[in-house]
Image (cartoon, grey):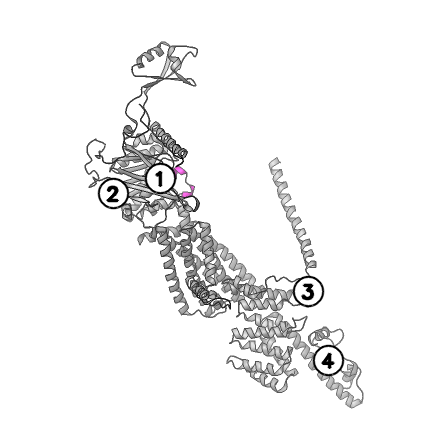
Amino acid sequence: MKAGTLARMVFVAALVLGFAGIWRLQKHIDLQQQTATVEADNLTLRSPRILKSMSLEYAPLVAAIYWTRVVQYYGEKHRLHQANLGLLWPLLDIATTLDPQILPAYRFGSVFLGEKPPGGAGRPDQAIALLNRGIQANPDEWRLYQDLGNLYYFDLHDYPKASAAFEEGSKNPKALIWMKVMAAKIAAEGESLETSYFLWKQVYDTTTDPSIKQNAEDHLLLMQAELEMRAINQAADQFEKQSGHRAARIGELVEAGLLKSIPKDPAGYPFVLGEGGKAEYNLDSPLLEKNLLMNR
Amino acid sequence: MRPSAELGSIAPEERREPTNVDGGPDIAKNGNMPSPAIEIERLSKEYPHGFLNLKKRKSLEDLTMRVEAGEIFGFLGPNGAGKSTTIKLLMRLIFPTSGTARILGKSIEDVSMHQNIGYLPEQPYFYDYLTATEVLDYFARFHNLTTADRRERVQKLLKKVGLETAKKIQLRKYSKGMLQRVGLAQTILHDPQVVVLDEPMSGLDPLGRREVRDIILELKKQGRTVLFSTHILSDAEMLCDRVGVIVGGKLRGVGTPGEMVGIQSQGMEILFELENAAQRFPLLEKATKTGERYRVESSESELYAHLNELKAAQARILSVAQIRPTLEEFFMNLVDADRAQANAVEVSGR
Amino acid sequence: MRNVWVVATNTFREAVRDRVLYNLVFFALLMMGAAILVGQISIGIERSVIISLGLTAISVIGLFIAVFIGVGLVSKEMDKRTLYALLAKPVERWQFLIGKFAGLAMTLAVNTAAMTIGLYLALWTVEHPLVGSDWQLLPAVYLILLKLVLIVALAMLFSCFTSPFLAILFTVGIYVAGLFAGELRTMQAVNLSPSTMRGFRAISYLLPNFENFNVMGVVAHGRPVPLALVWQSTLYAIVYGAMVLAGASLIFARRNLK
């Protein structure tokens, strides 16, 4: 083999090894960075106005980029089971300032800014501000009124305002008829399991955002369980009336013929009777924890 | 006799009967053009320079000159003398500070006059991505030619300047000499009456220079006027009917090459070699030696005596020729004198 | 006028040979990549992102071409002395200038048209069939083209009297300033005197109002571009551009070439 060819081969081999080394080194560096920046989320430029100026005439594209960041941010936080969603509002603020017509951002924000941690940021006030901006920029989008109503109903328990929101949204000729119905129902009854279930079902059925859909599904499952537990409690009350004492296990209710079989929660775990003879989640059921988190 | 550095004897050209090659008066050879092809009157150009452009540099001062129809006029001068400036002024690439000029009777401000002019810029450069054919076609389109006529001329000229084989290659691949030829082609494509060439020989090998010379002579034969600038004096001597010498922005003289240097011969020179290097004879003392070659100067009266002496010494005679002053020497004297004057001015503090 | 056309077609041909149009390859790759990625990382705004990205790319790539080649139209010819032989022909200097301008405008038009086709293809990949509102991309792209042509005129103006580097700087500067002209006009500040405000207003009208040509937000969300805006902006571009080119012609007519 000629000396020139050998030299060239050695050089190529050195290059390959060099890159392999860089690759491994980078992995180590990444690990270091991760451990160092646990909570230090990266959002250097916070001012929406400055960003809007810097975007020149390309604001809608930059808005789209920031909206993408929201999705990534939320997904990452969920993956790592981290509860602090402090950057959610700034990111949404920027995205909607750069492009006031970016509807998915408003809808996402209304759900996850309002939702209690770890599912959301737990800041319904920010969600209201976001939605109001959205409504002002997109007066024709009646669905934003739906989101506003949901916000007041679920996160702020402000039923008069919730009803007013649904009422306002129903004025849009494109709005579905249930908006008006709900406005009346909430004005009359305030909170009810029926209403809650219906509202979440609307979200579940119509959203295309997978995170929102998952969130709605969780709420629906919990409400289904709630309905089941009410039925169980009714049976238990019946049992007490009949036998004079509270049943200690659900099995007794079944034996007494008040229940056909031991009801299972939507996760597939049988309910139990807790202290005071009231229905409760099975200790093994994942819904137990979810219920604790979401319905504090 | 050396021509004097002071040009008292040769005044700048004012009025002169135009003559053609045959010696007779020029009788409207080119149709109805007894007037000069190019008339320049007190043309001046100043450039601001220095800090904040406050100072003015005179690159051309009060030039008055005529180029007669049908002649080859050489514009001579060292670099920076003002030759290119003059030509650029004529072509309206730059604008005069004062003075006027006319070409073919029309003011240089008249763009339509350019229909009849060909211009070859110094170190021409053309569009990288076009082929020679395309460039020539492009330039030709600005003249009133029919499509067929234009195409025919382009092909004809490509052949004439020897670019036929390279005509489809993009100009960025061309050598300097080839670019010069393209330049020359676009200059004469439209059969102009007046052809202005700025340093047409620069960068060419001897073969190329010969070709350019041939083209210039052919133009003259066709009755066209040629004005070209150069600092290569031998070309000027060979080609030009008249020359104008410009140094330091001022015209120093106009006339035939012969007039400029004086016709008088300065004697003869003999070049010879010796068979026997050890030989000694009186003439040898007066000779200069370069390598194996000897050179000795003889006056006309001394010539045959010297030749006999060399014959006796069995020297091999290489050549016997007249010593003539060249334009070069005339030129150099001018430049030296100019420099001396400039130094004197500086020294005197003005 | 024939001379203008001759210069224009030559300029166009030179741009094509100079591989200016290769940027289209880059654009095509960009749009294809975006079409593939966008569905996976942006939720709910696929169409909006493709349109925004596409229009941004058309605008930015076009901007680069308009500024850098626009400045070079005159500078390069002066630098490389190609201009000398040309001006010795029976051509007026303004004919040369307008011809160069027209040639680059044509190049930009072709470039933009090709990129628009690419944009439609990417859009079709993401969501087919195309909906009626997608035709609004055409006026949006047309307005961008108007803007680019105006920038070419400005680039030529600056290159007529400053160095290429400064000309690029000034052109980009005017572009950015022009984008903020509207804001300058409506600027409210407590501590500004009325005369200062008037001065700002005057400047805001003198600057080229490039926001006139920006309808990205409108089109990205499927809304129509008002026809009045289109023809009024056309008129604006024509008038403003003509003034700029007239100025450039005046300056260039008396410029001493080196």
Mark found first going from the N terminus, 1 or 2: 1
Residue B182 among magenta residues: yes
Which amino acid type corresponds to the residue marked 2 in the rendered image?
Leu
| Quarter of the figure that contains the N terminus of chain C | bottom left
Distance from Cα at disc 2 to Cα at disc 4: 114 Å
Q: In this rendering, do the residues under marks 2 and 4 share a single chain?
A: no
Q: Secondary structure at mark 4?
A: loop
Q: In this rendering, do the residues under marks 1 and 2 share a single chain?
A: yes
Report the mark closest to the observer, 1 or 2. Answer: 1
Q: Which residue is mark 2?
A: B104
Residue A174, percent across and down? Answer: 51, 79
Which amino acid type corresponds to the residue marked 3 in the rendered image?
Leu
Q: Which residue is mark 4?
A: A263
Q: Secondary structure at mark 3?
A: loop
Q: Quick check: B124 left or right of A21?
A: left
Distance from Cα at disc 1 to Cα at disc 2: 20 Å
Q: Which secondary structure class fits the magenta region best?
A: helix
